Amino acid sequence: MHEKVTQSELCQFIDQHHQEHDIKQLCEVLSVPRSTYYQSKHQTESKWKRENHQLLERIKKIYFESSRRYGAIKVHRQLIKEGFSVSLKRVQRLMKSGGLASIIQKKYTPYKQSKELVLERDKILEQDFSTTSINQKWVSDMTYIYVQKEGWCYLTSVMDLHSKKMIGYHFSKQMTTDIIVQALKNAYVSQRPKDKVILHTDLGTQYTSEDFKNLTSELNVVQSFSRKGCPYDNACIESFHATLKKEEVYQTTYVTFEQARMALFQYIEGWYNRKRIHGSINYLTPEECEQLARQIA
């Protein structure tokens, strides 16, 4: 029987069962010198340590390339994407041993729905965020960003719900209708949709203005509105702005408007659209998801 099994395999068997039986007895029964077993065990442990060291180096690179934004789940998915065969638990252990933890701790939680009366507007989307391809449903919203020399500045973003890509945005010192007009124009120029697109927003005065209404008609864009006081209706874009602030804005102090503008551009175009993987789109980046949709179309 022993002739059909290598000593290495016998050593592995002993290692697996040494807690149930005495190592000395197992070695005697299997005719394996104890020195051979311990040498094999040392070699196995050394190989495991080398693999862990190499794996941790790659994990560190992914972690710091994400500007410390990625936790174990996203690091693990990126490793799988690169062809590594590794478990999530192993990645978690290695990140913990290396002192690596995501700087993002709190998850986005929408506000509770308001009990105020609903302002009657077209609610076409009705929290149906499903799509079959790009340029079917867009969402837009505005958020505040503080700049030391300028005070509060304003970012308007437009997201494609299929790819989660930020297809248009505009950063401004004033909260005027022009900021959302420019963001939508940028989205339209970058995407050039062939058919009608639904654009869902909240009931902000800029989005309900006559100027914006005229622009959407001109671009063949159908407006849809959230119910008053219900951020769940526009949760996707609100979640993006929450992520933007946790991953970028709250990690930085912006002194000038131009510094903030460049940082937002680098985050959106350099990181979010092209490098940040998303669980909701099968751990692709928004750019990869969009390109895949274009190939299928």
Image (spheres, grey):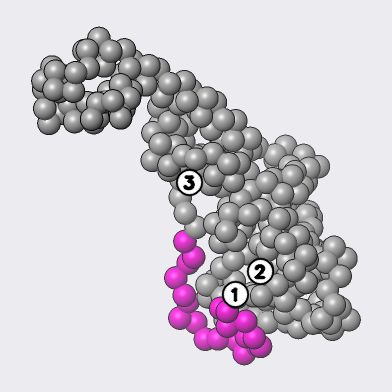
- The x and y percentages for residue 125 are 62, 82
Label 1 residue SS? loop
4 is within the stretch colored magenta: no
> Is the C-beta separation of discs 2 and 3 under 8 Å?
no
- Residue that carries the numbered disc 3 in the rendered image: 73
Circle 1: is it few (<14), some (14-19), or many (20+) Cα within 10 Å? some
- Disc sitting over residue 276 in the figure: none
- Residues 28 and 212: in front is 28
- Residue that carries the numbered disc 2 in the rendered image: 161
Q: Taking the image as drawn, is residue 69 in sight?
A: no
Circle 3: is it few (<14), some (14-19), or many (20+) Cα within 10 Å? some
Residue at x 72%, y 49% (from the top left corner):
274
- Residue that carries the numbered disc 1 in the rendered image: 129
Residue at x 55%, y 86% (from the top left corner):
118
Residue at x 71%, y 55% (from the top left corner):
288
> Is the C-beta separation of discs 2 and 1 under 8 Å?
yes
Q: CA distance from mark 3 to mark 1?
A: 24 Å
Q: Earlier in the sequence, mark 2 or mark 3?
A: 3
Q: How many marks?
A: 3
- Residues 297 and 158: in front is 297
Span highlighted in magenta in the image: 109-129
- The x and y percentages for residue 60 are 55, 29
**Does residue 75 sit above or below 293 in this rendering?**
above
Residue furthest top in the image? 35
Q: Taking the image as drawn, is residue 35 in sight?
A: yes
Q: Amino acid at mark 3?
A: Ile
Label 2 residue SS? loop
Q: Is residue 242 left or right of residue 164?
A: left
Q: Is residue 181 left or right of residue 107?
A: right
